[in-house]
């Protein structure tokens, strides 16, 4: 396989996570070789250096989310200019470095709000580099569409924007399974629930919603998460697996339990989200899935299974 194939798959993975508009209803979107060549020709690095820059940038950001880092700092660590980093990052992920940092910080902050009820909102704000309750609340509301205090009362701490992952080595296992972000934090839980069912959901026709506004698309994705959380049992875990795709790992080995949850979610189909006075109907489709049985499965294998289950449900 050519290097163009491998880079093509990286683009698919990244864009699917942060730019759902490119998920064509007829199948996954695909860059042409001309587009891949544009990636290589971005001034500032050679062919493989561009991949290394993206990998190093993502790793550095994840390790320093609680620090006051700027794009210039990340570029210096990656031995490239700020403009080169911004061009590469936006070209692949369709999001700026700054916006990605905000999304990751607010996702981590949301988890901390639910897992550490003894911490004040100001404590959480300071931990992620915000000097005031007000500044933190503005950033939090931008992502979660509610205040930190409202979130703490009603939400479960699911990851709305998981870590984006770009491999430093290109291998068939990664590419064939289209693993587009790191779900290894949940690996121990996956292993302890080998026989338990997953509930997977995806948004029907997100592209027209994004055409109204990408903010409207973000609200649709957030509402999808809320619907899954509302239907989940106390020990069920909801996590994001794609641009507009979510999975719920239940604590049950009974298929009937998983199907009841799916029906509860789908009962809300047609209920609208509101964006700037416009009511936009939201529909999900979904399926139930069990992976591996008694045997252990790798994260990449599990991810592929979840994606394939949703693809079959779409058909």
Image (spheres, grey):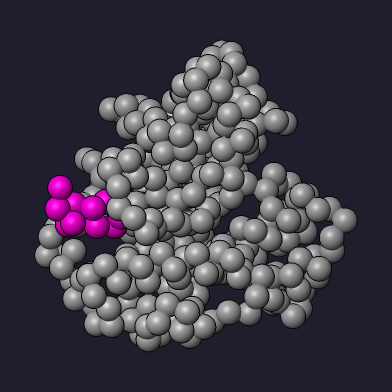
Farthest residue toward the left?
Answer: 34
Relative to 314, is 217 above or below?
A: below
Image position, residue 274 (x, y; %): 52, 54
Task: Tell me, yes or no, if residue 201 can be seen here.
Answer: no
Work out whether residue 97 can be spotted: yes
Frontmost residue, 88 versus 216: 88
Q: Quadrant of residue 178?
A: top left
Whether residue 298 is in magenta: the answer is no
Q: Residue at x 65, y 75 (%)?
A: 67
* 9 inside magenta stretch: yes
Q: Is residue 279 left or right of residue 307?
A: right
Query: In which quarter of the view is residue 216 placed?
Result: bottom left
The stretch of residues the image draws in magenta is: 1-12
Residue at 46%, 84% in the rendered image: 76
Query: Where 214 sits versus 299, above or below?
Result: below
Q: Quadrant of the C terminus?
A: top left
């Amino acid at each position: 396989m050519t290097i163009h194939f491998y880079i093509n798959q990286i683009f698919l993975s990244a864009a699917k996570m942060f730019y759902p508009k490119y998920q064509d209803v007829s199948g996954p979107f695909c860059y042409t070789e001309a587009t891949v060549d544009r990636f290589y020709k971005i001034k500032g690095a050679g062919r493989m250096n561009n991949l290394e820059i993206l990998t190093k940038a993502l790793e550095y950001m994840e390790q320093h989310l609680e620090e006051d880092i700027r794009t210039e700092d990340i570029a210096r660590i990656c031995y490239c200019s700020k403009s080169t980093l911004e061009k590469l990052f936006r070209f692949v992920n369709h999001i700026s470095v700054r916006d990605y940092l905000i999304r990751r910080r607010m996702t981590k902050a949301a988890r901390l709000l639910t897992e550490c009820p003894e911490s004040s909102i100001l404590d959480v704000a300071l931990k992620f580099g915000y000097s005031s309750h007000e500044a933190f609340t503005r950033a939090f509301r931008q992502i979660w569409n509610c205040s930190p205090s409202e979130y703490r009362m009603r939400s479960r701490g699911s990851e709305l924007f998981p870590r984006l992952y770009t491999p430093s080595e290109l291998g068939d296992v990664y590419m064939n399974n289209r693993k587009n972000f790191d779900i290894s934090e949940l690996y121990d839980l996956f292993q302890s629930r080998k026989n338990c069912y997953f509930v997977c959901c995806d948004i029907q026709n997100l592209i027209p919603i994004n055409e109204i506004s990408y903010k409207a698309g973000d609200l649709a994705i957030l509402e999808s998460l809320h619907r899954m959380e509302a239907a989940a049992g106390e020990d069920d875990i909801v996590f994001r697996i794609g641009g507009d795709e979510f999975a719920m790992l239940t604590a049950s080995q009974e298929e009937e339990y998983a199907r009841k949850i799916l029906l509860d979610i789908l009962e809300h189909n047609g209920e609208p989200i509101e964006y700037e006075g416009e009511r936009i109907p939201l529909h999900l489709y979904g399926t139930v899935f069990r992976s591996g049985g008694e045997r252990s499965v790798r994260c990449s294998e599990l991810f592929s299974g979840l994606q394939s289950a949703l693809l079959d449900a779409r058909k």
